[in-house]
């Protein structure tokens, strides 16, 4: 009988301990859940408070202008030098249909193009065997819409370079450089300069002697 009573007591003690453990686990779970709910509610309240403060400071959300990152990177100047250049040099105007979509040169290229146009205006003096009609205008100003082209190299039907192409060593950057490097044009310009110098020298020969004779009194 003593052994039976002891076994029943031990079983009752173990069952009571398990009940206590389950109760304590449930209490801890509910407590942790309550803490998590409180933290979530506090986070939501703080977010609402920040949003309300931002709206009060900047006004409604509709007034805030949102800018795209890609467009700003392409439009904004990258360096201080680019900012100075963009502020001083105006871009070239877009082409117009009335000029057959021929673009106007940029303002920065006008000094270089002015020398090219001056060389073209002197084509009558450069080539003695050709006759050209007189250009419209005074010959000093340049047109607003014009373009200077470059001869593109061509290939044969077999894919090789054509013999009509100018060698790379003979190519120049501008028309003025080509004229300076042209031997025939240099010879003609030198001969014309010597002829003009001879005429001017003949006109000025004995000029001082003739002036002295005219200054002498007639009696």
Image (cartoon, rainbow, N blue to C red):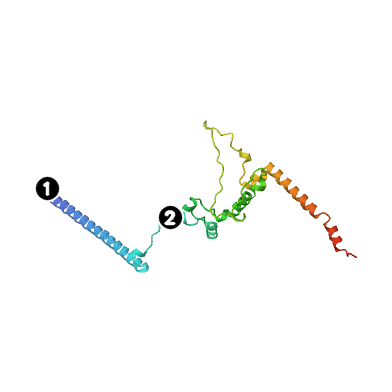
**Between 137 and 30, the one nearer to me in the picture:** 137
**Between 111 and 191, the one nearer to me in the picture:** 191
Farthest residue, direction top:
158
Of the image marks 1 and 2, the number of the one nearer the N terminus: 1
Say whether residue 166 is left or right of residue 17: right
Residue 44 drawn above or below residue 16:
below
What kind of element bears circle 2? Answer: helix
Query: Which mark, by number, is residue 130?
Result: none
Distance between mark 1 and mark 2 Cα atoms: 90 Å
Residue plotted at (75% across, 48% down): 195
What kind of element bears circle 1? Answer: helix
Q: Which residue is mark 2?
A: 71
Say whether residue 94 is left or right of residue 28: right
User: Residue 185's quadrant in the figure?
Assistant: top right
Q: Which residue is mark 1?
A: 3
Farthest residue, direction right:
219
Residue plotted at (82% across, 57% down): 207
Residue 41 on image: x %, y %: 27, 62
Q: Quadrant of the C terminus?
A: bottom right
Residue 153 drawn above or below residue 53:
above
């Amino acid at each position: 009988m003593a052994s039976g009573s002891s076994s029943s007591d031990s079983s009752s003690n173990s069952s009571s301990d398990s009940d206590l453990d389950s109760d304590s686990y449930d209490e801890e779970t509910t407590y942790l859940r309550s803490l998590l709910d409180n933290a979530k509610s506090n986070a939501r309240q703080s977010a609402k408070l920040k949003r309300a403060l931002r709206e009060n400071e900047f006004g409604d959300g509709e007034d805030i202008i949102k800018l795209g990152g890609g467009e700003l990177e392409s439009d904004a100047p990258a360096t201080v030098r680019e900012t100075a250049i963009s502020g001083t040099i105006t871009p070239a105007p877009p082409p117009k249909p009335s000029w057959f979509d021929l673009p106007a040169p940029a303002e920065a290229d006008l000094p270089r193009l002015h020398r090219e146009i001056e060389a073209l205006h002197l084509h009558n003096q450069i080539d003695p065997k050709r006759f050209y009609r007189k250009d419209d205008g005074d010959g000093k100003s340049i047109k607003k819409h014009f373009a200077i082209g470059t001869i593109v190299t061509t290939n044969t039907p077999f894919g090789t370079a054509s013999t009509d192409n100018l060698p790379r060593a003979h190519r120049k950057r501008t028309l003025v450089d080509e004229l300076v490097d042209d031997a025939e044009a240099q010879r003609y310009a030198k001969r014309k300069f010597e002829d003009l110098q001879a005429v001017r020298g003949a006109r000025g020969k004995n000029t001082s002697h003739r002036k002295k004779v005219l200054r002498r009194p007639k009696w």
